[in-house]
Image (spheres, rainbow, N blue to C red):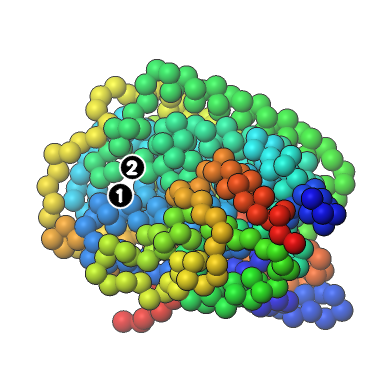
Amino acid sequence: MGTVHSAAIEPYRARLFVEDEIVKDAEITVGVNHRGVERIMEGLPVEKANSLTEKICGICSGVHLWNSVLVAEKGLEIEIPERASYIRIIVAELERIHSHLLYLAHGNEVLGHETFSMRLFYIRETVMELLRMIGGNRVQYGVPIIGGVRPRAELDEMKTQKIREGIDYIREKVKEFADRFTSDPMIMSRITGICPLSRKDALRLAVTGPTLRATGVEFDLRREMECYDPFEFDIITQDDGDVKSNLLVRVFEIFESVKIIRQALDNLPEGAVVDRSWEMQDTDITKSYVEAPRGTLYHSYALEDGRVRNVVIRTPSMANIGAMQHALIGHHITDAQLGIVQCDPCFTCTDRAIEIVKI
Amino acid sequence: MGIRSYARARAIHAMLVYTGGCNGCDIEIVNAVFSPKYDAEQYKIFLTWNPREADVLIVTGPVTKQNEKPLKEIYKAIPEPKLVIAAGACALMGGVYKNIHGDIPSEEIAGPVEKIIPVDAKVPGCAVRPEDVLSGVVSILPKLLEAK
């Protein structure tokens, strides 16, 4: 079905082998929008390279920058002020909320329910305005820098108050949406039991993020990250791995993110937001993992004379492509689009360096 | 105003083509048309994915080499009169991906859009703001309506 077709929302190639309207095999190919960000980053000063990572993805731009900055901080052994760490988490969780809202809006559009989709886009505007207030831009806000956060992103009394009002509004509206959504018999019958992914297959295909949690595996990298230690939150899981579980995991994760932001605002420590007393030195290849809205995100590079070497980036959607292919098999062709969308694809992120060299 | 432009003024279809940017501009454009806050549909501008029914082509992204041919074909498929809007820093000059300041120019990028198809309006920004997209589309509408 189809070749590379730029009229799709994101260019990718989905080949479905169909027999009697049942999908027998599926193949998803990426590589059309390969831009070679790693290659451009190679040899740039580390600050410049970090700001480039933001342009990898327009949905989870903040978390890419955060992870890239974490690599440099790990390599140079920089301790960041606690206040900076809290502000980073607030931004990352706001980003998770807007990414999940976008996912839900897109999912509803595919389902054919445009009213829900528009309502969710409207709720999402609140988050975008909050991010614009914190970072100065709606999409690429660039909050973390090496040693803390940008002084521009310092939260004062007025801004914290606005974020509180914003997250209260989101919580209320998303709850209303969830009630309406789950009590709608038409929608529920359309999404229950469609394109399920079993827990065993999910683990075999190394699926990450909410798609993995929708199959019942309790894995969230935020539990293992040091900066999330002061916060109390639950890992959301669902059992079935079908479209319904995937949608509901994201809905409940929005509530958890709201919880984390509220805790961060209540206990926001005093002090400076950036520590500039570090010195540049050469480092070995350093690795860092964070939990992006779509799953585990990996960045690694080495530093040489303040310049970046051997950049490797692995995005969560790359791992989830396996889930997309596997979930479609044995189902009706009209469910195929839902099956791809349920895994929250972001093919822009995914087009990384394609060559794999075994050493 | 002839009968054709009279009819056209009531249903302007914009097609969004994504040529390898970072998704930021695309979501902002879809946002500009769809979301109730900006709501381009109040100006009778609708989003379509079919080049045959489009009047306005909105191009985002720096145009990767693999995307060059599809973009040309989509441009050919749109019926006359047609207008092209390049939205975002990447579409205007290749953005960060073209590596303008670097020593080695990127080999992956064929763009900017201007090199490949004629561009009527340019919307700057990284990522573009929905307000700018709206004003960009609205500013070239007279050109579309005056065309025979």
State the quadrant of the N terminus of chain A. Answer: bottom right
User: From the viewer's perspective, is A191 left or right of A205?
Assistant: right
Whether residue A131 is visible, yes or no, is: yes
Q: Residues within 10 Å of mark 2 (few under 14, many from 20)?
A: many
A264, A308: nearer the viewer: A308
Q: Mark 2 lies on which chain?
A: A
Asked which secondary structure carries label 2, the reply is strand
* Rendered view: A34 above or below B119: below
The relative height of residue B19 versus residue A81 in the rendered view (above or below) is below
State the residue position of label 1.
A69
Of residue B136 and residue B144, the one placed in the foreground of this image is B144
Give the chain of mark 1.
Answer: A
Q: In this view, does A21 lie above or below A185?
A: below
Instruction: Tell how many labels.
Output: 2
Q: Do the residues labelled 1 and 2 touch (CB within 8 Å)?
A: yes
What's the mark number on residue A272? none
Residue identifier under label 2: A144
